[in-house]
């Protein structure tokens, strides 16, 4: 059986300070105060990598822009070239079929 552990040890503040953070969070929660993160005025733009553009050019059925952002993020997360290539091949097939990135999980 493999032991599970933290990838990195994180230094916590001293106990008194940590307890005060928890007490403050509880007080805010009880009062119903929500912290709203500011939204960026600019949408996040993902550039289509050249290697993916080249594959898209070779596959005219997969030229749709509609789902590209989801697929580009997925492809860029690949750690190895083999995984990247496998994801490109799957993405081209699924885009050509008009499928969203997470089509398998949709009802």
Image (cartoon, rainbow, N blue to C red):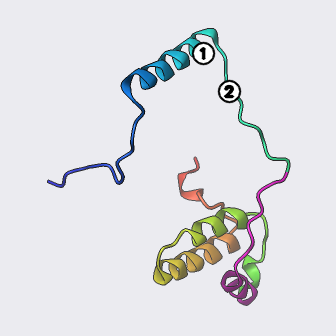
Q: Position of residue 15 (x, y in %)?
A: 37, 25
Q: Is residue 9 magenta?
A: no
First in sequence, mark 2 or 1: give its number.
1
Which quarter of the figure has residue 37? Answer: top right
Element on which disc 2 rests: loop
Q: Is residue 45 left or right of residue 102?
A: right
Near mark 2 (Cα within 10 A), the count class, few <14, some 14-19 or many ≥20, is few
Q: Is residue 34 left or right of residue 17?
A: right
Give 22 or 41, whichever is nearer the viewer. 22
Q: Is residue 13 above or below residue 48?
A: above
Give 90 or 51, whichever is nearer the viewer. 51
Q: Is residue 46 magenta?
A: yes
Measure how far apart labels 2 and 1 are at the Cα level.
9 Å
Residue at the (59%, 72%) spot, across then down: 75
Q: Is residue 75 above or below residue 25?
A: below
- Say which residue label 2 marks: 35
């Amino acid at each position: 059986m493999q032991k599970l552990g933290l990838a990195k040890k994180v230094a916590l503040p001293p106990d008194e300070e940590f307890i005060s953070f928890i007490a403050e969070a509880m007080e805010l929660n009880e009062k119903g105060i929500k912290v709203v993160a500011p939204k960026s005025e600019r949408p996040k733009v993902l550039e289509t990598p050249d290697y993916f553009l080249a594959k898209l050019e070779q596959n005219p059925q997969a030229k749709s822009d509609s789902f590209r952002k989801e697929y580009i993020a997925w492809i860029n997360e690949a750690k190895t070239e083999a995984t990247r290539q496998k994801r490109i091949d799957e993405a081209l097939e699924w885009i050509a079929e008009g499928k969203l990135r997470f089509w398998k999980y949709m009802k």
